[in-house]
Image (tube, rainbow, N blue to C red):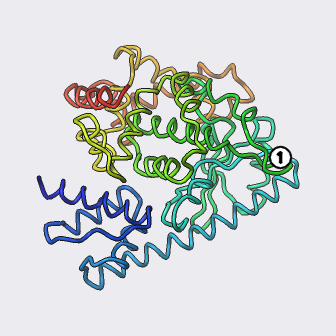
Amino acid sequence: MTDMMKTKAYFLKMVASIICEQPIPAYSTDINLQQLYKLAVKNSVQGILYLAIKNGNIPVNETFENNLRNMYMTFLMRDAAQEAERAFISNKFSEENIDFMFLKGSHLKKLYPTPEIRYMVDMDVLIKKDDLEHGCHILLENGFTQYMDNYKDVIFTKKPNITVELHQMLFIDDYFMHDYFSDVWEKAVQVSEHEYKMSDNDLYVYTLAHLAEHYLDGGSCFRPTMDLFLMERILGDKLDFTYINQQFKTIGIDKFAEKIRLLYNCMFADGEYNDDLTTMENYIVLGAPVKDVASVAKVASSKQSKMSRIITTLFPKYAHMVARYPLLKKVPLLLPFFWLKRIFRLLFTKNEGMIKKRKDLINTDSDSVDIMREIFEKSGF
């Protein structure tokens, strides 16, 4: 077993010990502390690493421990700030008769021994399409700045460290999971006059579906895998897996869901590994074994031909174009003009990001695509 594999194995045992409130595993000198730290940062669990060092017998120097302590304190302050903003949004939207639903981490962090160790990049709030403009206006009037409107959601920031995403839908309207989640309001559980939440079963379904989206994009997958493990561990019989599995079949991710359930019991409990699960674990914990993972993953997970991908990139659907060119909301007939503008920009830009996108579109490494396709196939896609 290589040093990285030994460190990965210890990393998972360490995480499991903290989230399950069990003794910290014994530390051995063949564990690479720098690799352990990098894994914690990559998977956004620095708070867990700090608690493991604080409560266990992991020998680190004072500088190392102080750096982690500072990160942990930042997580604590961020969590407190997010809770304050959550209370503000809840009160203000209720006063303004806006129905709303907090998503993902806002509920899932309550499963953890302490909420700050479940790091939240942002707060996700679902509101109805007809209330979106009103909801945006409220945030803008109360210290938030609009960062982006990608049609699916509008992203706001507020100094020093708050990000809020106002969703009008859970998945973009041409994504394969969009239609299933279009009736999210009909399934929701009412908390108060205007606040709603998903049932435990539907939260499990959505969390795994969201994980699947990130998995196919080459994105971060570790925290939702932890979330799902803790949901099953803590909620137990409250979860109806007959219902849940039927939803996965309807969505078309049932094979992936079955393997994820096996995997999180390997990662954080005493499940039995096989080759497919080991591949999935390495992908989630260590990252994809290819360069330019987002571009490669997009090609690997797509059933489109190369020419179809080029056409889709040059002529995106209206929903995607309006996110970049808001004027299209008022004048949809300008869509062909903005397509030409996009093509011109893609062909003649000096922007490094756009140049890279152009090269990736035409020359995505076929060997890397084959590697990612094998990972996705082993994962149940």
Residue pushed farthest bottom?
62
* Viewer-nearest residue: 325 or 293: 293
Judge left or right: residue 172 versus residue 354: right
Residue at image x 22%, y 69%? 33
Q: Which three-letter amino acid code belongs to the residue tagged 1?
A: Ile
Secondary structure of the residue carrying tag 1 is loop
User: Quick check: 345 above or below 158?
Assistant: above
Q: Which residue is mark 1?
A: 98
Residue 349 is at least partly visible in this image = no
User: Quick check: 80 above or below 93?
Assistant: below
Judge left or right: residue 2 versus residue 198: left
Judge left or right: residue 254 versus residue 283: right
**Position in image of residue 235 (x %, y %):** 57, 50
Judge left or right: residue 355 versus residue 334: left
Residue pushed farthest front?
237
**Position in image of residue 97 (x %, y %):** 88, 48
**Position in image of residue 316 (x %, y %):** 53, 23
Residue at image x 36%, y 14%? 305
Residue at image x 58%, y 68%? 160
The number of callouts visible is: 1
Rendered image quadrant of residue 326: top right
**Crowd tier of the residue under label 1, counting other residues whose Cα lies within 10 Å: few below 14, some 14–19, many 20 or above:** some
Residue 196 is at least partly visible in this image = yes
Residue pushed farthest left?
1
**Position in image of residue 181 (x %, y %):** 63, 30
* Viewer-nearest residue: 359 or 256: 256
Residue at image x 57%, y 38%? 206
Rendered image quadrant of residue 198: top right
